[in-house]
Amino acid sequence: MSQFLTQNFFELFDIPLSFDIDLPKLEIQYRDLQRTLHPDRFANASDQERRISVQNTAQLNEAFQTLKSAPLRARYLLQLKGIEFDDEKDTTFDPAFLMEQMELREKLADIKQTADPMTELADFLQDISKLNMAMVSELATLFSNDNDEYLNEAKQVVQKIRFLNKLQQEAEELEEDLLASY
């Protein structure tokens, strides 16, 4: 059971080290492992066994959350392949992406002043979702060409998704504010 903590997330679930994974299989493996490792099963065990069970369960939960999310899975895969991330310093993007981000931020800021902010916000969130899906699709393509150039491009896409996710979060906060004001 202590070997569990030394395995990478893909090994934990006995799935291939790949960006494209079988999500239903991941969920089945997760539930099976959760039943096996859950601390309740070790209620009468020694303190050390209970502590290891808690650690294993935490590792299992982190692994599941990472692998079920395409951007987190991509980032994790890149890290396994030796690509490091520094979210504070890795902020260089192509000018087209930066311009698109500025335009999206302006659009989000203007939504409150529109005649139908809820409809505008729904459309905005749908646009963000489409951009996100396109980037996840791009990640799948980049990971299928396993070489350094493509892996560095994948890192850029992961960072772009991070920006989009922050924008989506801000849009969802605006939605909460608008709903509260009705």
Image (tube, rainbow, N blue to C red):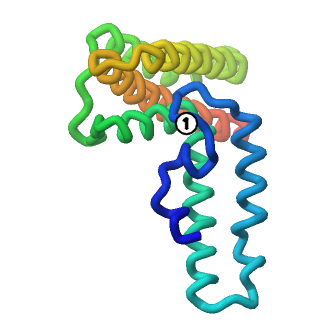
The residue where tag 1 is placed is 169
Number of residues whose C-alpha sits closer than 10 Å to that of mark 1, classed few (under 14), some (14–19) or many (20 or more): few
Front residue of this view, candidates 53 and 122: 53
In this image, 67 relative to 24: left or right? left
Q: Where is residue 147 in the image (x, y as percent from the top left)?
A: 32, 18
Q: Where is residue 58 in the image (x, y as percent from the top left)?
A: 58, 64
In this image, 42 relative to 14: left or right? right
Q: What residue type is labelled 1?
A: Gln
Identify the residue at horizontal 53%, vertical 48% (top origin): 9
Q: How many marks?
A: 1
Vertical placement of residue 76 versus 114, above or below: below
Identify the residue at horizontal 78%, vertical 45% (top origin): 28
Front residue of this view, candidates 161 and 182: 161
Vertical placement of residue 109 versus 162, above or below: above
Q: Where is residue 109 in the image (x, y as percent from the top left)?
A: 48, 24
Q: Where is residue 66 in the image (x, y as percent from the top left)?
A: 55, 44
Identify the residue at horizontal 60%, vertical 91% (top origin): 47
- Quadrant (top left/top right/bottom left/bottom right) for the C terminus: top right
In this image, 5 relative to 117: left or right? left
Which element type, helix, strand or loop, lies under badge 1? helix
- Quadrant (top left/top right/bottom left/bottom right) for the N terminus: bottom right
Quadrant assignment, res 178: top right
